[in-house]
Image (cartoon, rainbow, N blue to C red):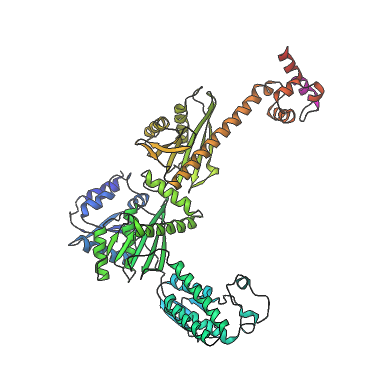
Amino acid sequence: MNAKIEQLRKTAMKLPLLPGVYIMRDKSGNIIYIGKAKALKNRVSQYFGSQRNHPEKVRRMVSNVDRFDYIITDSEFEALVLECSLIKQHTPKYNILLKDDKGYSYIRISGESWRRISEVKQKADDGAQYLGPYTSGWFVKNAVDEAHKIFKLPTCARKFPQDFGKGRPCLNYHIKQCIAPCTGKIKKNVYDEIVDEAIEFLKGGSGTSVKELTERMNEAAENLEFERAARIRDRIAAVKRMADKQKVVAVKVENQDVIAFVRDGEGGCFEVFRFAAGRLYDRENFLLKDVGSPSEERAEFMKRYYAMRDNIPPVIAVDGETDDAETIEEWLTSLAGKRVRITVPQRGEQAKLVEMCKTNAAERLAQSKGGTVAETSALDELGEILGLKKPPEYIESYDISNTGGSENVAGMIVFKNGRPYKSAYRRFMIKSFIGQDDYASMQEVLSRRFDEYEKNKESGEGFGRLPDLILLDGGKGQVSAVESVMRDRGLDIPLFGMVKDDKHRTRAITGGGGEIAISSRRRVFTLVSSIQDEVHRFAIGYHRQKRKSGTVKSSLTDIPGIGKTRAAALLKHFKTIKRISEAEMEELENAPAMNKTAAQAVYDYYREKIQ
């Protein structure tokens, strides 16, 4: 512990055991973090104790703290209110800061003769008709897209009637997603009627729209306008189909939010689903760079999110435990003016809702990193079942390969963000002993790997980077052997073995606490199986290569004048050592890369062996 942190710890130990807010400052006096505490002394002193158990985000913050201030409050609730107010005012670097780009959105119906419907962020004085404002841009965009699909309105840039008959209709016409006024075959009064129906749909929703359209269909049928009645019937069917798609989950609570959090390395993503009247009316996601424990992050996120949202529902379903949940509930209740509950659903429709929200968070995070939702979810779940502080973004795996103790080698592979990272693969020849000893081999390989880390750690690349997780192809014996290597070096890296069944298939993960079954965890099972298969392939491939080169060395390369290049050329030409040994002088002399002297040497070498 450095002198500065020791000094800050001594100062923290003098704080009162009272609720309040603490304010961390850097050398320039800038506020870098604001937090609240039930007991200031206990909470603040934790920052300046052992750094080993802190997330990387907290360690970085602590390393930049020069001094701190504090404000005592009458209760933890008052501390939370003050904390939210101060964070909003000062926007400290190490607090979760959400970019609120909500604004308002409008549905625009252009004022031109052949009207168009679109979604816009600003209301202009341009003679157009505007519906709104709406607080959810996602809702507006979806609603406009639905209107275009149901009523088959044009979305292209063509001008009507100027562009009638100019060029062929676009793809949307051929897949029956546009009525194609560009053909000049749609009458103006029919087009106006369709646009009016779309506007009514946008104003009243699917229920109102179906009712009014049904009345018009019946009226057209009474007037023997059967073609018009059929067109309206098709629109009614399209509205109903779209409404059915929206009812993905039947929500028993009419108004509620669903919040889910997914981590990947040092980053994370929060997804928020907002429901009203049992219908999803808004969704938002927020990417975060530096994240700590999920329970802390959920608490921080909820405080920041609802500090910038007016509409707070009576129920907020989250995907896991939240720090200070009771105090946050009290704060939300005071903001909403009605009882607000934070729940963690375990089963039924609510649990399905949360899972759907979490899947979308994983998808957004995967997109931001160029990965897939399956990879992100598998890493998140693997970290969870192994009890890791964060998902293992960088995984190293090792396997030993030999034949009866000869050509003893090892392979090291790396999976980064759930994918093979082949530029970081490494191969090892076992040097410290001869014979077969997988435990000693693992010890040697990991010792050499960590020696390389000490030499290259300043670079942070290749061997200069420590993994988030080490997986050994083997059981408790291999794990115990490597644990001693890490213990001697003071390294604290999660270490587990990958255990196979009698059919050589991945069965479980083993560690100091026994075996962890993974067969029922589809995503984790697939990831770990892929790692085990890949490290085995890589190690055995190197072993076969060494055996092949060993065969060449033991025969051809022992002959004067025959190096590796000529030996390889001879093997390629004759296919086997036996055929080389039986070849006549003329055959050897005419072989690729050979001359008379070299051919004579090979011929004499094998003839002497025969004698």
Whole-percent x, y for residue 595 in the image: 79, 26
**Residue 337 seen:** yes
Closest to the observer, 470 or 203: 203
- Which sits in the foreground, 248 or 301? 248
Question: Seen from this angle, which residue lies furthest top?
Answer: 611
Whether residue 31 appears in this view of the structure is no
Left or right: where does residue 480 sit relative to residue 174? Answer: left
User: Residue at point 45% right, 79% down?
Assistant: 209
Relative to 230, residue 403 above or below: above
Give yes or no for residue 327 being in the magenta stretch.
Answer: no
In the displayed structure image, the side of residue 460 where residue 547 appears, left or right: right
- Above-or-below relation of 243 to 110: above
In this view, the residue in front, 362 or 290, is 362
Residue 25, position as x, y percentages in the image: 31, 57
Task: State the extent of the magenta-drawn residues as a range.
Answer: 588-602
Vertically, is 537 above or below 337? above
